[in-house]
Image (cartoon, grey):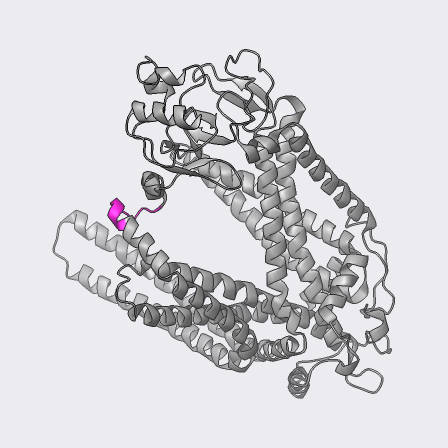
Amino acid sequence: MGCCSSSESKRDWKPLEERSCTDIPWLIIYILFCVGMACICGFAIATGGASRIIQGYDSYGNTCGRDNAKIEGVPLSGGDMTENKYVFFLDPCNLDIINRKINSIALCVSRCPATELQTYSDVKQFALNNGSHLCSYDISATRYTSHSDRFTKCPKLPVPPSKAVPLLRRCIPVDIGCYAEFAQAFITFVSDNTALRRVMAGVMASKEIIMGLCLLALVLSLLMMIVIRYISKVLVWILTILVIIGSIGGTGVLWWLYADHRQALNTNTTTVFGREVASDNVKALLIYSIGATIFTVILLLVMFFMRKRVALTISLFHVAGKVFIHLPLLALQPFWTFLCLMLFWVYWIAVLLFLGTSGTAVKNNSTGVVEYHMQGPLQYMVWYHAVGLIWISEFILAFQQMTIAGAVVTYYFTRNKSQMPATPLLSSMARTIRYHLGTLAKGSFIITLVKIPRLILTYIHSQLKGKENACARCMVKACVCCLWCLEKCLAYLNQNAYTATAINSTSFCTSARDAFIILVENALRVAAINTVGDFVLFLGKILVVSCTAFAGVLALNYQREYTVWVLPLFIVCMFAFLVAHCFLSVFENVVDVLFLCFAVDTKYNDGSSGREYYMDKSLMEFVENSKKEGRYKPDDGDGREMKPMARGTLA
């Protein structure tokens, strides 16, 4: 199972007609891990955690809507709450922001107060008329107005009208104005409640415009994936001009500031301290100017020598646009991935909440409230559950990458496009499920191994803020940065390993090794694609956001009654950027897969008889131009033509 145990000889990159299962031991490990996740969910349901979250429970350990068993040491536990199906909080507006909970005694009641109760007499009358007791169980309704503990064991006056949440059976105040303090803790620009109300009113009043603009962002993102192949050359020229102007202009400004400060120093007649400060500034500007000059020269030289390789990026963008025309279902891939992630995250959060109330009931002596704590080995289930969040999420993302890679590989290595499967994306998905789930499990586990310590160190760094040990904070931050860089490098290698698996049907480690060799052999091309290509895609995202924001300003301008535009426009722009990022990330993935296919194609084929290229005409023109300039020399290969992926072997 190790990555260093491969003893295979040098492989030929050939799209196989017969595929085989890869990394089966890792698939078994992954299945066993998922079974463990299911067992944790079953444990939470069996121990009553799920019922406590769904049905609700009071501060004395009673689950609402059912008969309860007695808890030792808690006098008010063990009540029959069959008729009391709703949870009522004595002080629903007392929010504990740090612990993210309502800091109030909770009771099981049969009905939520629909109208405001201003006095204890109103609370008493409500209990007598409806049978819903809003004070602690040890106080009878007839004593609500005279009991000595009514200020602590009865609801805070006035009792706001509330309504039961349909699924969770909690009595929540109808007027959410009491949560203004909680909202202000997160919205720092709000200085008073009226400002918050104006902003929220603007959002609610313009919800139709927001939905229309979000739909516009979705359409623009889809169009951008098709159009970007036509405007990529213009964007590359814009990038080149901006970089040249920025580097030369910045260096020139630094030298001008150095000359100006030096001249001022020579004519300076201020104090000795002032001359020392000015002298230090002159030395700093000289160092900055020299460093900027060296950086600019190196940058211009790199751009000069890589100018031809930028043409490959433009060609790949052009072919990627064609791929989306031939494989339109690729545009829907982000939807399926997002849906799968959302469903899993909802399940994960639900199980986490179940676990929070699945432990042993323990009475808090200071407050008298019953809390649930997991003791012994069971407390490690939360950590197991947390690892599952990362591994399974990475597995879902890896499945998307493998599916896209398989579909693009099928498109690239099929000479006659009419012989392609009717739905290459679905065929790729079926191949991945049938043969390569083990490879995805291994690749996603490697990312998980790096991500877990990075997240732990990030948490430690956040806890060290404000502490005096600056050296420890710096070391932790450096480790976090190193792990982040390692994670990004491994993620890029994983993506290319999945492409190699889609081509050769080899195990993860063999595919990663083969892909790494190809990437090293084409290091300059990889650098050009990852710099120029990423910037072009970034400009595409900015274009989508700008157009959406411009349309939003025009739409809101015709609705003058919406006085606060800040939050509606912010929501629209954030959604536009996220949508553009999702779609153009798929485009970037397609470009990376095409590049690896192109590198393999040029390594084993030279265009001669029997070794014809598979590539598109635009890529063929790039290769021909490279041959004329003497920059391209094909590998000798083995003299045999690579086998195309036939129709009958893709299902």
User: Which one is in front, 262 or 423?
Assistant: 423
The answer to whether residue 242 is visible is yes
Q: Write the residue at 67% across / 74% down.
A: 327
Please indicate whether residue 153 sits to the left or right of residue 371 in the image: left
The secondary structure that dominates the magenta segment is: loop
Q: Taking 424 as reference, is 374 above or below it?
A: above
Q: Where is residue 432 shown, x and y percent of the image?
A: 76, 60
The answer to whether residue 646 is visible is no
User: Which one is in front, 464 or 204?
Assistant: 204
Residue at far left of view: 269
Q: Quadrant of residue 352?
A: top right
* Residue 275 inside the magenta-drawn segment: no
Q: Where is residue 190 shown, x and y percent of the image?
A: 28, 48
Q: Quadrant of residue 293?
A: bottom left
* Residue 191 inside the magenta-drawn segment: yes
Q: Write the residue at 32% across / 38% down.
A: 178
Q: In the rendered structure, which segment of residues is drawn in magenta?
A: 187-195
Q: Taking 138 as reference, is 121 above or below it?
A: below
